[in-house]
Image: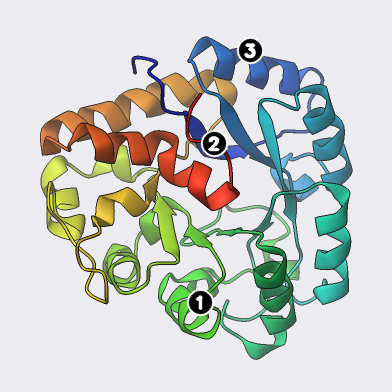
Amino acid sequence: MAKGATLLCDFHSHLYDEPNYAEALAEAAQNLGFDKICISGGEARFGMGSNEELLIQADEYPDLFVPFAFVRLGFDGAAEVEEIGGMGFRGLRVWAPPAPYDAEEFYPVYEAAEALEMPILFHTGFLPVTPLDRALDVRSHRMRPVYLDTLARRFPGLKIVGHGLGGPWYEEAGETLRHHKNVFFDLSGSALRRKGAQFFRASLGFENGTVVGEGGDERVWSRILFGSAVRCEEIAAVERDYERLFRSLALPDGVVDDIMGGTAARILGLSEEA
């Protein structure tokens, strides 16, 4: 995508626990013209780096990397979120909860994030299978996007970002997106490859798709974020997938700018100008 004045941001990128991976990610992002990359780590079973490593790499690339801390729902609480907020993290990342995302036992985490104005990136849909899934009692239905509807109603000041348009529960994701101005989704995962433009037109509308609730002049597409969620060498291919979709739907330039970084800048409190 041609680099213009608008900030370009990948809102969903992983930091893998591999030698020199951060350097490779930074090089790939800079070669593609991205101004910001939101990086998150997580659990060793997925090969991801720790929260501590994220901060180290964010310090190495302070103008590029935006660190999101992995939080263990059901184990971490408000105190841990407040500590994370004081360490320099800009957002939180959650997945594989021991109960559905809208379980009240997780509310202290959401309340603390809302108070600190830290967005939360939720994995919605299926997780990759690992040998530890049985021991960890992983259940994909606990990560259905409809649970974000509850959170959006209960925490209207919390910026809620879902992964991959909630696939395979796309309709739930689309309706949640339409009803709540504090809900956003990226299109990472397989949907861009497996689904055609007609699917997205039906799910989200095209040029003049609007939200259902108040402020119906807002385009639904302006709350879709660019997120790659792939290894650094695959980001360019994901960007091309987004570009093909933009052309097929004839999305206005302003909406494309929002998707590619403008909306992320507003969520994170960054300047929208690169």
Residue 140 on image: x %, y %: 52, 68
| Labels 1 and 2: the sequence-earlier one | 1
Q: 10 Å neighbourhood of mark 2: few (<14), some, or many (≥20)?
A: few
Residue 137 visible in the shown view:
no
Residue 156 shows which numbered tag?
Answer: 1
Mark in front: 2 vs 3 = 2
Instruction: Name which residue type carries label 2.
Output: Ser
Pointers 3 and 1 in contact (C-beta within 8 Å): no
Residue 219 on image: x %, y %: 23, 55
Identified at 28% across, 65% down, the residue is: 174
Instruction: Name which residue type carries label 1.
Output: Pro
Residue 244 appears in which quarter of the rendering? top left
Q: Which residue in the protein does label 2 denote?
A: 271
| Labels 2 and 3: the sequence-earlier one | 3
Q: CA distance from mark 1 to mark 2?
A: 23 Å
Residue 270 appears in which quarter of the rendering? top right
Q: CA distance from mark 2 to mark 3?
A: 22 Å
Secondary structure beneath dot 1 equals loop
Q: Is residue 91 above or below residue 82?
A: above
Residue 27 shows which numbered tag?
Answer: 3
